[in-house]
Image (tube, rainbow, N blue to C red):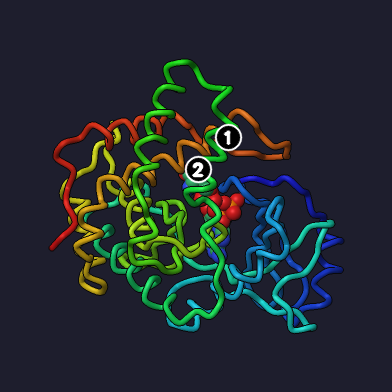
Amino acid sequence: MSVFTPVTESELADWLRNYAIGRLENLQGISAGVQNSNFFVTTSLGRYVLTLFETMPRAELPFYLHLMAHLARHGLPVPAPVANRDNEYLGTLSGKPAVLVARLSGKSEMNPGAAHCRRIGAMMAGLHLAGVNFGRKQANPRNADWRRDCARRVRPHLSAYEQAELDAELVFQAGFDLNKLPQGVIHADLFRDNVLWDGEFVGGVIDFYFAGVDALLFDVAVTVNDWCADADGRLDPTLTSALLEGYAESRPFTAAERAAWPAMLRAAALRFWLSRLEDFHRPRAGEMVLVKDPGEYRRILGQRATDTALPALPA
Ligand SMILES: Nc1ncnc2c1ncn2[C@@H]1O[C@H](COP(=O)(O)OP(=O)(O)O)[C@@H](O)[C@H]1O
Ligand SMILES: N[C@@H](CCOP(=O)(O)O)C(=O)O
């Protein structure tokens, strides 16, 4: 988690006067997450999550909030944002843009089996299909342009050996055009810790603050890299097949996507190696700040670049 900006109970109680959700009963900082400041909020009428956006431009936030509202309206277990008495989702608290969303039930499963992976594949296809008629557009904030820029920022902090790996991957990715693949709204960070399980069902998909329009296959690759890798970063064929089949039942893959799959797994691994390097080498100040291991995604990237038997997309 992270709490970068503290909020006091009296500040929040005052802020909640502009909502119709009762009076504040409890406020608790959340230690998971790396991007924003998050708090569990209990009022006399329900349970919510308060997010203070630390670095994201205010103008980009309505895309995420309306996307969550749109997906919730389509029956997906996504936290619906709460409107205030001015009928706005987005407010300001402690000087930061702030939103309350519904707190969903369940907990993350960090050791998923094939049944979990199949359901996550199906859930992601549901998100992609429901996104088709979402009216707003905003680019994936961690797209290929961002990856090139971030590589320039972190490169001076790397060893000569890591610099060579990074340079080689950027050359490889420069020859790969994701824009030719089917595009749509993607979650882009559908890691195990962003899914809450309620028994065998998905009780919640959270953390849409990296969502945007990009190749749908990028989302699949991000998700497979996290859900289906073993301790060495190698893809487990059973878990991978389950996830891909669960997805393809609702949205079959195209021939172009099948051809792009190995390169896309590398692009997705590169994205998280870079963001973790940036968080590691250029950390932000905060009260409780979680920094994830960049080495994990360096290993995953190396594995995807050298594995000659990667599980293929289903025909
Ligand atoms: N709507 C929600 N319902 C239940 N728990 C939530 C919800 N949103 C966030 N959380 C909890 O807060 C943690 C951090 O949220 P996350 O969105 O991942 O943070 P960040 O935006 O900093 O990446 C999650 O791991 C989860 O435990
Ligand atoms: N999933 C990313 C980090 C993004 O942080 P989140 O807590 O917002 O999911 C990673 O593992 O590097």
Image-quadrant location for residue 103? bottom right
Question: Vertical placement of 221 versus 48: above or below?
Answer: above
Residues 200 and 193: in front is 193
Amino acid identity at mark 1: Glu
Q: In the image, what residue occupies the spot 83% across and 69% down?
A: 15
Q: In the image, what residue occupies the spot 16% across and 36% down?
A: 308
Pointer 1 residue Cβ closer than 8 Å to ligand 2: no
Residue 147, label in figure: 2
Residue 84 position, x and y percent, is 75, 79
Q: Secondary structure at mark 2?
A: helix
Image-quadrant location for residue 11? bottom right
Residue picked out by circle 1: 278
Residues 215 and 18: in front is 215
Amino acid identity at mark 2: Arg
Q: Secondary structure at mark 1?
A: helix
Residue 97 position, x and y percent, is 75, 62
